[in-house]
Image: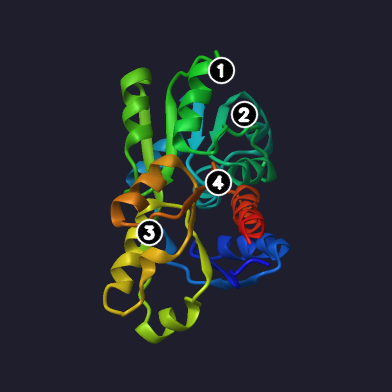
Amino acid sequence: MSRYEQILVTRPLPQAQAMMDGLLATGLKISCLPLYKIRPLQPCARWQRIKDNLQNYHTLIFISQNAVELSLPLFKHLTPGEKSANFKNWITWGIGRKTCETLIKYGFNPENPPQPETTEGLIESIKTSNIKTGKCLLIKGRGGRKDLEMWLKETHKDVEIISVYERIPESYPNNIIRNLLKPYSIICFTSGEAIQHLVNLINSTDIDILRYPLVVPSKRVALIGNRLGFRNLSISEGASVESQTQAVLDILRQEDTIS
């Protein structure tokens, strides 16, 4: 029988709830400590310019489910006929299965989710798709990684980038963190930034955070965890509920085998 008793989910709400629901299949207690909250950015002059020129874009790239949900005001002014024509003609990409499902929900016609469901997976998918990418609109959150932006600017030149949300670090009293971090917990992360933030929060406590096993979405995030001192990391090859649940199940199976 596995020694683990709990899984701690750290992604922002409301996405955390979907992850918690998916992880119920593990049979462990599921707890939540959102390390960031998502705050929509107020429309600015650039929004209007992009809205007025939507028909000039050939490719739309959405970095996350939040990017889809919070960019909808850019498209609401289109008539049903314009939506039908544009949504069908745009080459649309989304990182991750959930992002693509959300695009479909709102009428877009996305390409298949990249494998793995990461920035690197998306870049490779675009490279091998043989789809010509014209004027491109990248819809994302403020800050974060620059890899995709840099690659698009180097290879496609005509790229417009707009941020529609920002991630605000959450802060918690020490007693809440201590109560949530049970002795035998598996912690699920979706970014290296979140790992760093939890380490910063823990630094003012006596919790030995580095001994906890982590589930992370990519080799890049695993390297960040390694640099911070974590040694027990499992890579889920994406941040989807399905991939992270499978990574947790693999940890539990490995424990059963050893015991």
Which circle's residue, 2 or 3, is located before the other in the chain? 2
Secondary structure, mark 2, is loop
Residue at the spot 57% in from the left edge and 73% down from the top edge: 31
The mark nearer the N terminus, 1 or 3, is 1
Q: CA distance from mark 2 to mark 3?
A: 30 Å
What residue would you read off at disc 2? 111
Distance (Cα) linking label 1 and label 4: 24 Å
| Gap between marks 1 and 3 measured at Cα | 33 Å
Which comes sooner in the sequence, label 2 or label 1? 2
Q: Which residue is mark 1?
A: 129
Label 1–label 4 contact, CB within 8 A: no
Residue 16 placement (x, y as % from top left): 57, 63
The amino acid type, in three-letter code, at marker 1 is: Ser
Q: Name the amino acid type tagged 2.
A: Glu
How far apart marks 2 and 1 lie (CA) works out to: 9 Å
Circle 1 SS class:
loop
Callout 4 amino acid: Ser
Label 4 with label 2: CB-CB less than 8 Å: no
Mark 2–mark 1 CB contact (< 8 Å): yes
Residue, x 63% and y 51% (percent of image)? 250
Task: Please name whichever residue, 97 or 28, is drawn nearer the observer in this view of the structure.
Answer: 28
Quadrant of the rendered structure where residue 248 is? bottom right
Q: Earlier in the sequence, mark 1 or mark 4?
A: 1
Instruction: Answer left or right for 103 relative to 55.
Output: right
Residue in the foreground of this view, choosing between 214 and 196:
214
Q: State which mark lies toward you, 1 or 3.
A: 3
Q: What amino acid type should be assigned to the residue bearing mark 3?
A: Ile
Is label 3 in a helix, a strand or a loop?
helix
